[in-house]
Image (cartoon, rainbow, N blue to C red):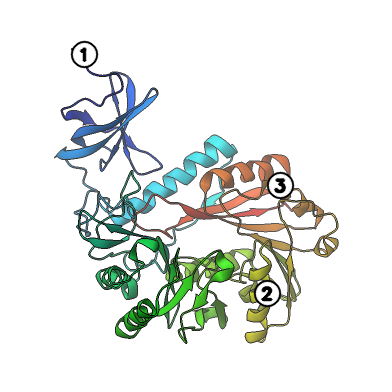
Amino acid sequence: MSRRRNAPPPTPVEAEIESLTHEGRGLTRIDGKTVFIDGALAGERVRFRYRRVQRRYDEGCVVEVLRASPERVAPRCPHFGVCGGCSLQHLEASAQIRMKQASLMEVFARIGKVAPQRWLQPLSAGHWGYRRKARLGVRYVAGKGRTLVGFRERGNTFIADLAGCDVLHPAVGERLDAIAAAVDALSIRDQVPQIEVAVGDTASVLVFRVLRAPSPADIQALLGLAEREGFHIYLQEGGVETVRPLGDQGTDLHYSLPRHQVRVDFLPTDFTQVNLELNRLMVDQAIDLLEVQPEEAVLDLFCGLGNFALPLARRSVSVVGVEGDPGLVARAQSNARRNGIDRVRFYTADLYGDLDLEPWVRERYRKALLDPPRSGALQLLDWLPRLGVERILYVSCYPATLARDADRLVNGLGYELRAAGVMDMFPHTAHVESMALFERPK
């Protein structure tokens, strides 16, 4: 009887790995068909097992490395390969950064039809314990007789059975067992789908998403967890507007940018960069590249809490920050007052919508900083030359949209791509953060 159509071959297969994809998977071809293999590195010979057979390509995972790459290292985490939180722990740290730089170079050429005049030195900070923001899945598993807390397994929706996590900040990563045990003791343990993590300079917050209100005994159990482990506990019973501290568990979350004498306060569910040390390096490099002079006005689009705008205002005569979330704008304004910075104004605006009536578009700016989401900033790029912007610093969390926008800036609007480089915001993952400097020719 022939093998069922689309059923993976039952036995492992040997293959030579040609290259590493942007997602960090090994690429090979079997009988002319592309196969993506988790856990394989470029130049290796491996034995792999098929995991999924599809029409255009197949997927598999390594079961044995027959000839290892010189860049292969032993993963530090015993859960690597099962947990989906990391994908590159088997690749040496500097090689991870080279892979990300090559990925950025490739999309600039293929999508943007551009190349930077120079490549920036990649930004890198610590590779372990860096993650200060995360959403952890929670699930009571009857077969195990206990609750699991952690990231989802690679390739499915199950929660990985983690004893700890080396990429999470140690305040949380070393206490996953304690958190799971506390949830396990709740009467609503099957009504807690998620815990959001937020770690600042001096406090660690856990936001428990609950589908049913906790009992008085549950509240005491969570307060006990907070006292034993040093957490501040918040509850979320609905949308983000329902997030509230449990009892007197509220705290002032903040992080500092010491070089610029700035402190940024934030709420547990606010967007902040996950890697604080890398964020500090990123802010420093962005400001250095913009070379803001005291008499120059600066426009900061997608400004959030003021991560860039507040340091920029220490150097500029005027900074205007624009953000779509009114809550973030209100907290950016509070941050400016708290830091004694009065040369910055913040506006709420849909940066993907009609901007003609916005008051800030009637001003002129010499320089601009853009820090958009994955969708990029294409819709507003044509405004920049109209506003007089001569130099642009673009911070990107998705290379493909940066490359697309670079095409518009360079090939459509006449800017030059002066410099670009990657930032290792998420070590041990294939996620690529980068920045690019554009300038109108003199």
Q: Identity of the amino acid at label 3?
A: Gln
Tell me the crowding category of disc 3: few under 14, some 14 to 19, or many 20 or more residues within 10 angstroms, Cα based: few
Q: Nearer the viewer, mark 2 or mark 1?
A: 1
Quick check: can you spot residue 288? no
Q: Identity of the amino acid at label 1?
A: Ser
| x and y, in percent, of residue 58 in the image | 33, 28
Give the CA distance from mark 2 to mark 3. Answer: 25 Å
- Quadrant of the snapshot with the N terminus: top left
Point 41% across, 73% down: residue? 214
Residues marked 3 and 1 touching at CB (< 8 Å): no
Point 69% across, 58% down: residue? 391
Q: Identity of the amino acid at label 2?
A: Ala
| x and y, in percent, of residue 272 in the image | 52, 67
Give the left or right position of residue 44, taking residue 201 as reference: left
Give the CA distance from mark 2 to mark 1. Answer: 65 Å
Q: Where on the picture, by quarter, is residue 147?
A: bottom left
Q: Earlier in the sequence, mark 3 or mark 1?
A: 1
Above or below, comparing residue 63 to residue 1 in the picture: below
Q: Earlier in the sequence, mark 2 or mark 3?
A: 2
Q: Nearer the viewer, mark 3 or mark 1?
A: 1
Instruction: Kindly identify which residue carries mark 2.
Output: 330
Secondary structure beneath label 1: loop
Q: Earlier in the sequence, mark 2 or mark 1?
A: 1
Tell me the crowding category of disc 1: few under 14, some 14 to 19, or many 20 or more residues within 10 angstroms, Cα based: few
| x and y, in percent, of residue 349 in the image | 74, 61
In terms of depth relative to the viewer, which is nearer, 157 or 12? 157
Instruction: Kindly identify which residue carries mark 3.
Output: 379
Instruction: Kindly identify which residue carries mark 1.
Output: 2
